[in-house]
């Protein structure tokens, strides 16, 4: 949930720096990864005293899955912002991953998910629906189908990244997993942008001090620190899907932050949305506490995500 709160600061911090509008969203995503990943690797070597060769001990398949999921998520997410709008995109990419995870759990598992996790998922979905109800707009021709497909792909990529993070953190620390994964994701995204946007101007040609500060904050805060917290949380979650449900706090925190820093007034539907999402998080927290106290309770079919 702490990682989701950090992710929720991205939109507000970008709004606080008007010059960020000149930077293509895909390149902003690349800059975040290119700063966050190497920064974590430097900490790994200098502070944690872990040799860089430790990356070689990570499972190649799951490391590649984490990096590819992260890179695909960045590209599809930012394109969906343009084609669908921020509200619709956030609603889909925050709500779909837990639903996908739960569906996969039912398809591949033999046991039902914990009742508390299902209740939390339902409350969070209702809350996100309130967020979308007040501001989601649909054009005369309906939702852009290409944007909708990209949002679904982004959601699937996030599920893949979550499952990979949980597998990797079973045998390695979150700092190593996040640092290696983000760095590899930056390299993948760099190649993708070079292939599909060869004429894109480099970020350094457009950056002033304010924009440079924003990029470094996004790279070190909502990327580096957030992904370390994300990986650490996934290592402690009973299932990958539980981590996905916990991340649904992001839009509520973003709305509250915009209220305090940007003087944006919450609409009645946003207030209801915040209430339902926070209720979902409390329900999930209590469910996790009870399951830790009683290990005999079912772990939930979402564990099959990592099989």
Image (cartoon, rainbow, N blue to C red):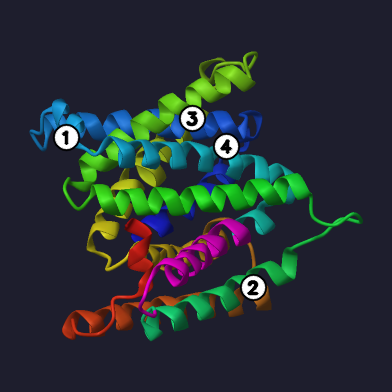
Q: Which residues are the magenta region? A: 91-112
Which label is found at residue 30? Answer: 3
Reading the image, the residue beneath label 1 is 57
In x, y percent, where is residue 146?
74, 44
Q: Does residue 267 sit above or below 294 in this rendering?
A: above
The answer to the question of whether label 4 and label 2 lie on touching residues, with beta carbons closer than 8 A, is no
| Camera-side residue of 69 and 199 | 69
Name the residue at 65% across, 29% down. Answer: 22
The x, y position of residue 259, in whole percent, is 57, 64
Q: Residue at x 65, y 75 (%)?
A: 130
The local secondary structure at tag 2 comes to helix
Q: Is residue 105 left or right of residue 307?
A: right
Residue 243 to residue 276: above or below? above
Using the image, tell me which numbered label, if any, was put on residue 75. 4
Disc 4 and disc 3: Cα gap in Å?
9 Å
The reply to whether dot 1 and dot 4 touch (C-beta < 8 Å) is no
The answer to whether residue 111 is magenta is: yes
Q: Which mark is residue 107?
A: none
| Labels 1, 2: front one | 1
- Cα–Cα gap, marks 4 and 2: 25 Å
| Main SS category, magenta section | helix
- Between discs 4 and 3, the one toward the N terminus: 3
Between circles 1 and 4, the one closer to the viewer is: 1
Q: Residues within 10 Å of mark 3 (few under 14, many from 20)?
A: many
Q: Which residue is tagged 2?
A: 129
- Distance from disc 1 to disc 2, alpha carbons, whole Å, reads 42 Å
Query: SS of the residue at dot 4?
Result: helix
Q: Earlier in the sequence, mark 3 or mark 2?
A: 3
Element at label 3: helix
Locate the N terminus and report the quarter of the image it occupies.
Answer: bottom left
């Amino acid at each position: 949930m702490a990682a989701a709160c950090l992710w929720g600061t991205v939109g507000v911090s970008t709004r606080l720096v008007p010059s960020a509008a000149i930077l293509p969203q895909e390149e902003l995503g690349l800059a975040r990864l290119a700063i966050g990943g190497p920064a974590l690797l430097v900490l790994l070597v200098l502070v944690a005293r872990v040799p860089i060769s430790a990356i070689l001990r990570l499972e190649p398949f799951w490391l590649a899955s984490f990096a590819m999921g992260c890179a695909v998520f960045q590209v599809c997410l930012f394109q969906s912002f343009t084609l669908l709008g921020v509200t619709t995109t956030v609603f889909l990419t925050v709500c779909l991953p837990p639903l996908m995870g739960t569906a996969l759990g039912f398809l591949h598992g033999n046991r039902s998910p914990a009742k508390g996790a299902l209740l939390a998922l339902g409350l969070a979905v209702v809350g996100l629906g309130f967020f979308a109800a007040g501001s989601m707009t649909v054009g005369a021709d309906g939702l852009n189908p290409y944007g909708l497909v990209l949002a679904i792909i982004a959601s699937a990529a996030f599920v893949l990244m979550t499952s990979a993070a949980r597998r990797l953190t079973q045998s390695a620390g979150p700092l190593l997993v996040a640092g290696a994964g983000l760095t590899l994701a930056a390299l993948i995204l760099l190649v993708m942008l070079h292939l599909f946007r060869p004429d894109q101007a480099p970020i350094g040609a457009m950056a002033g001090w304010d924009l440079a500060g924003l990029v470094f904050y996004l790279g070190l805060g909502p990327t580096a620190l957030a992904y370390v917290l994300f990986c650490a949380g996934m290592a402690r979650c009973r299932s990958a899907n539980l981590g996905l449900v916990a991340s649904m706090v992001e839009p509520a925190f973003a709305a509250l932050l915009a209220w305090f820093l940007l003087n944006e007034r919450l609409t009645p539907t946003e207030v209801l949305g915040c209430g339902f999402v926070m209720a979902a998080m409390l329900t999930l927290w209590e469910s996790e506490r009870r399951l830790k106290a009683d290990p005999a309770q079912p772990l939930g079919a979402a564990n099959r995500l990592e099989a």
